[in-house]
Every structure is written in structure tokens, then in C-alpha cells.
Amino acid sequence: MYLEILFESKEVNIEMQKELINGQNNYLNYRRDNDPARPMLSSLFGKEFTESLIKEVLFTT
């Protein structure tokens, strides 16, 4: 579906692009703050490493 919409589009709307990027950043921030794997990863690798992994690798903005 995404590719269909992409190939059917005729021009890039800058405002829509900004809105999409903002939405993606909001999603990444939410997932970073509410990652359900955080407790498991913390118990396996420690809190400091887990926070670094989540913020710098998995959910970077």
C-alpha cells in the first residue's frame, strides 16, 4: 500500500513531509520511553547498557 501511494504521488508536499517526520519522531520517542523489553534487557545487560542501546541504537531520533 505504501509503495502504491508513493508511485501514484505526483509531487512532494513539504508540509506533509514535515508532518510525517514529526509523527515518526513522536512514535520513536514513545517507543523509547515505553519499550516493553527494557526490564528484560536491564536484567540481562544492566541498566546503563540497556538505556544506551535503547536511546542510541533502537530508537534514535
Image (tube, rainbow, N blue to C red):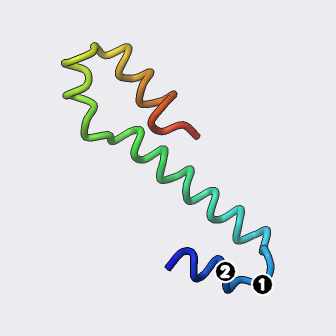
Which residue does the image show at 78% across and 84% down from the upper left? 10
Which residue does the image show at 42% across and 25% down from the upper left? 53
Query: Is 28 placed above or below 57 here?
Result: below
Left/right placement of residue 4 relative to residue 50 reads right
Which residue does the image show at 78% across and 74% down from the upper left? 13
Residue of label 1: 10
Characterize the local packing of mark 2: few (<14), some (14-19) or many (20 or more) Cα atoms within 10 angstroms.
few
Element at label 1? loop
Quadrant in which residue 11 is drawn: bottom right
CA gap between label 1 and label 2 equals 8 Å
Left/right placement of residue 40 relative to residue 57 reads left
Q: Nearer the viewer, mark 1 or mark 2?
A: 2
Q: Position of residue 50 (x, y in %)?
A: 35, 22
Query: Is 5 placed above or below 48 here?
Result: below
Instruction: State if disc 2 and disc 1 touch (CB < 8 Å).
Output: no
Characterize the local packing of mark 1: few (<14), some (14-19) or many (20 or more) Cα atoms within 10 angstroms.
few
Element at label 2? helix
Quadrant in which residue 32 is drawn: top left
Which residue does the image show at 33% across and 42% down from the upper left? 34
Q: Position of residue 7 (x, y in %)?
A: 67, 80
Q: Position of residue 61 (x, y in %)?
A: 58, 40
Q: Which mark is on residue 47? A: none
Quadrant in which residue 9 is drawn: bottom right
Query: Is 1 placed above or below 43 here?
Result: below
Q: Amino acid at mark 2?
A: Phe
Q: Amino acid at mark 1?
A: Lys
Residue of label 2: 7
